[in-house]
């Protein structure tokens, strides 16, 4: 039998945790600088507020909430902004390779179990009608897990080649949606991103306003749109009358969580 690596062995091989921890560390160390950039006089964000101002105190609180939310949505992007082009590409390639191998290996393990319908209850010539109800439920759950893993595996086959802007594009989708939600104009959105990029001296070649729109904003929104559509497909595809609502709900939640984690890169 082919040696199928465990998830822990794959984690040891790719060391994804070092990248995930670096993202958190980078954010903690540089969030004050990010907030300063977002609240600078050159930042278009300070002119917007998501709610109607009722009083001065309410206005101040809402303004702070707005800035903090904007900063939190740039956590992953902040990490990529502070890397060189080569480093950004390597991070995306490493994390994609790790998650692809995890999905493939887990799918193989599930399929190996499902290939043997007599697992836990081998047929016996003198008792052909015996059935293992526990294993029947296990097979139902594994069948849904296989569907989830197949969906993710198919998705990864269609990923575009990773480049030095990919990490920024994927990580900034929610940020642009947020800017749209608070009513920020297209012109101000581009100005804001350009200002933040300048503050963090982002290593990239496309530095003018039009290229920020074409190279960052448009791909970011497309990645976000696809992720939302795929999440809805996952929720709709997982159903079984063999499981109670609580178990079914948990399986759907785990499938959505899996998709969010591996599509982070």
Image (cartoon, rainbow, N blue to C red):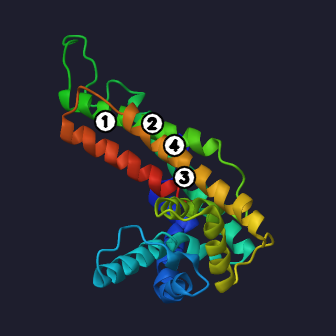
Q: Nearer the viewer, mark 3 or mark 4?
A: 3
| Residue that label 4 marks | 152
Q: Secondary structure at mark 1?
A: helix
Q: Residues within 10 Å of mark 3 (few under 14, many from 20)?
A: many
| Residue that label 3 marks | 224
Q: Are marks 4 and 1 in contact (CB under 8 Å)?
A: no
Q: Are marks 3 and 1 in contact (CB under 8 Å)?
A: no
Q: Secondary structure at mark 4?
A: helix
Label 3 vs 1, first from the N-terminus: 1
Q: Gap in Å between the C-alphas at discs 3 and 4?
A: 16 Å
Label 2 vs 1, first from the N-terminus: 1
| Residue that label 2 marks | 233
Residue 228 image position (x, y, % from top left): 48, 46
Q: Nearer the viewer, mark 3 or mark 1?
A: 3
Q: Nearer the viewer, mark 2 or mark 1?
A: 2
Q: Is residue 150 visible?
A: yes
Label 3 vs 4, first from the N-terminus: 4
Q: Nearer the viewer, mark 3 or mark 2?
A: 3
Q: Where is the C terminus found, in terms of image quarters?
A: bottom right
Residue 257 image position (x, y, % from top left): 39, 52
Q: Quadrant of residue 62?
A: bottom left
| Residue that label 1 marks | 141
Question: Which of 33/230 is in front?
Answer: 33
Q: Gap in Å between the C-alphas at discs 3 and 1?
A: 29 Å
Q: Gap in Å between the C-alphas at discs 4 and 2?
A: 11 Å
Q: Gap in Å between the C-alphas at discs 4 and 1?
A: 17 Å
Q: Residues within 10 Å of mark 2 (few under 14, many from 20)?
A: few
């Amino acid at each position: 039998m082919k040696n199928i690596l465990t998830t822990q062995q794959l984690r040891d091989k790719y060391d994804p945790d070092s990248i995930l921890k670096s993202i958190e560390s980078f954010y903690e160390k540089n969030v004050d600088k990010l907030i300063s950039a977002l609240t600078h006089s050159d930042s278009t964000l300070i002119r917007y507020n998501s709610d109607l101002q009722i009083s001065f105190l309410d206005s101040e609180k809402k303004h702070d909430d707005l800035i903090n939310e904007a900063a939190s949505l740039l956590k992953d992007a902040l990490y990529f902004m502070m890397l060189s082009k080569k480093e950004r590409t390597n991070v995306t390639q490493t994390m994609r390779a790790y998650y692809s191998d995890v999905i493939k290996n887990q799918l193989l393990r599930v399929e190996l179990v499902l290939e043997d319908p007599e697992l836990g209850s081998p047929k016996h010539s003198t008792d052909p009608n015996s059935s293992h109800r526990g294993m029947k439920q296990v097979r139902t759950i594994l069948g849904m897990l296989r569907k989830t893993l197949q969906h993710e595996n198919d998705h990864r086959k269609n990923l575009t080649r990773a480049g030095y802007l990919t990490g920024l594009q994927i990580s900034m989708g929610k940020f642009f949606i947020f800017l749209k939600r608070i009513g920020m104009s297209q012109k101000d959105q581009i100005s804001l991103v350009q200002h933040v990029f300048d503050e963090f001296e982002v290593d990239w070649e496309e530095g003018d306003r039009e290229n920020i729109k074409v190279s960052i904003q448009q791909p970011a929104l497309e990645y976000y749109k696809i992720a939302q559509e795929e999440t809805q497909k996952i929720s709709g595809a997982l159903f079984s009358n063999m499981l109670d609502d609580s178990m079914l709900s948990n399986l759907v939640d785990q499938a959505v969580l899996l998709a969010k984690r591996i599509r982070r890169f």
